[in-house]
Image (cartoon, rainbow, N blue to C red):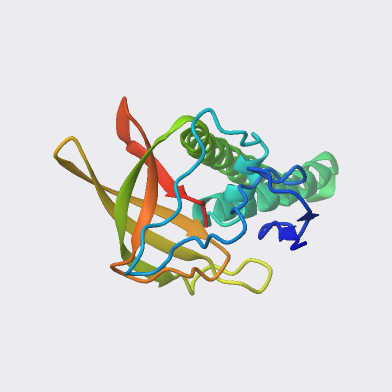
Amino acid sequence: MSRIVCPWCGTGYVAFRSNCGQCGGPLVEPGLSPSEGPGGDPPMPPPPPRAISGRYAWRLMASDGWAIGAGIFTLLGGIFTFLGALLALAIPTAFVGVPFLVLGILFLALGVAGLSRRHRVAGRVVEVLRVGEPVLGRVATVERNPMVRVNRRHPWTIAYRFEVGGSHYEGRVATLNPPALRPGWPVRVLYLPASPRLNTLYPHP
């Protein structure tokens, strides 16, 4: 019997399930690939609501360049705030500590605000994965971001287009996994009927 392995955390399963119980990431049913190439349609998702864990939002943020940048600001802000507070409390070094403290608080505020915003964005993606309606789309571009590096890997950005009710929409997803998709290939897109601009790919890469 073939094992199903989560592409996000490596947890193995004997029986198919829609999402990983360890990290919450969606799993692909055995025998199906994220895209069957130009000659075939990608797999259909299960009917909503789908069992996608809220923890999956944190996995999405791990490959989000803006979230990574906000995390760096938060870390630097925490360090500067701690050092600045220690120096400001000591009278001889107060003139150095106060600027460090102010700079640290500024970095910390910007970082926390950025993380909060990106987590809300990731939460909306999880909501689309849970209850979104499927439609056929096409890959527009597949690009690697050489400016960002996470665990010795560069994130990839997949841009795609789809049509709903005669209107054309575009979407983007980021992933640390090298995508098995090419421009022009068909993809399955999930979108919210009330707001098709909220969309993502299924299976999420």
Q: Position of residue 181 (x, y in %)?
A: 42, 68
- Given residues 37 and 7, the one toward you in this image is 37
Query: Which residue lies most toward the left here?
Result: 166
Indicate the quadrant where residue 144 lies: bottom left
Indicate the quadrant where residue 81 lies: top right
Residue that appears at 57% across and 64% down: 176
Indicate the quadrant where residue 152 lies: bottom right
Residue 95 seen in this snapshot? no
- Given residues 7 and 44, the one toward you in this image is 44
Query: Which residue lies most toward the front here?
Result: 1
Q: On the rendered structure, is 169 left or right of 86? A: left
Check the image and report above or below for 48 versus 60.
above
The quadrant in which the N terminus is found is bottom right
Check the image and report above or below for 101 versus 43.
above
Residue that appears at 53% across and 54% down: 64
- Given residues 127 and 105, the one toward you in this image is 127
Query: Which residue lies most toward the top here?
Result: 194
Residue that appears at 71% across and 46% down: 20
Q: Position of residue 23 (x, y in %)?
A: 72, 46
Q: Position of residue 98 (x, y in %)?
A: 69, 43
- Given residues 56 and 31, the one toward you in this image is 31
Q: Position of residue 114 (x, y in %)?
A: 53, 42
Residue that appears at 42% across and 46% down: 200
Residue 55 seen in this snapshot? yes
Numbered circles on residues, count: 0
